[in-house]
Image: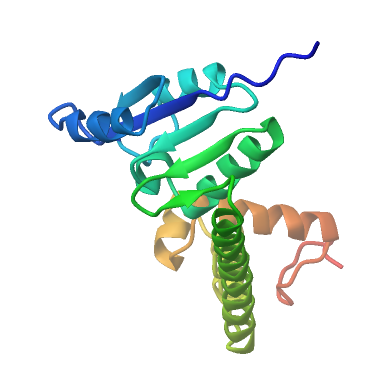
Amino acid sequence: MSLSPRAYKVGYARVSSLHQKLDSQFDALNQVGCNKIFWDRVSGTKADRPGWEQLMAYVRPGDKVVITELSRMSRSLMHLLEVVQAFETQGIELISLRENIDTSSATGRGFLAIMGTIAQMERELKAERTAAGRAAAKARGRTGGRPRTDPDKLEQARLLYLHSDKTAAEVCRVVGIGRRTLFSYLVAGAKLNVCKDSTCPDSQCG
């Protein structure tokens, strides 16, 4: 003989700070017959919520998690949909008293399906806006990242460094570039074995 699910109503209450009271949420959850209530006193934006973690470890297939309103449970729309999906996989229903949502009903499931569609639309619109912004920046000659150093400045710094008694730091201050930029340019030129100074007497220059 198989055992039927226990079908507990498990409540969850949350306030954002230690100074706020949970009494009204406890009253509402007790009124609808919750067998056990877990709670947190922590901001909803934080992922670390001990009471919520205890609830997730406690609930079993056939249980119903009851909250006074969706904002007490979820940090965002995406988090809400993730929780509902996890509950569905485990055979757990969700009831939100304020929004009158019950995922055991067709209406409740339909409402959450609409919210899922809205979340997907928001992701796609965000991706489209990002792509449009990149295209606009590219059209204006901005490709992202740090702006490239003016090649004339690099060559001026190279000539000063090689053909004067100034130190690298002094050259960089005069020209207005960084030492790392200067040495990267010098190394790149050495690898190519090409001197850009047509007046340079160095016989190694090509």
- On-image quarter of the N terminus: top right
Image coordinates of residue 171 in percent, x first then y, are 47, 58
Position of 137 compared to 73: left or right? right
Residue that sits furthest to the top in the current view: 1
Q: Is residue 113 above or below residue 126?
A: above
Q: Nearer the viewer, residue 190 or 35?
A: 35
- On-image quarter of the C terminus: bottom right
Identified at 58% across, 65% down, the residue is 114
Asked whether residue 59 is in view, the answer is yes
Identified at 32% across, 26% down, the residue is 40
Residue that sits furthest to the front in the current view: 1
Identified at 69% across, 19% down, the residue is 4
Asked whether residue 148 is in view, the answer is no
Q: Nearer the viewer, residue 40 or 127?
A: 40
Image coordinates of residue 9 in percent, x first then y, are 47, 27
Q: Is residue 68 above or below residue 47?
A: below
Q: Nearer the viewer, residue 170 or 75?
A: 75
Image coordinates of residue 85 in percent, x first then y, are 64, 43
Identified at 57% across, 49% down, the residue is 81
Position of 5 compared to 96: left or right? right
Classify residue 136 by image quadrant: bottom right
Classify residue 11 by image quadrant: top left
Q: Is residue 11 above or below residue 158?
A: above
Image coordinates of residue 32 in percent, x first then y, are 35, 34
Classify residue 146 by image quadrant: bottom right
Residue that sits furthest to the left in the current view: 19
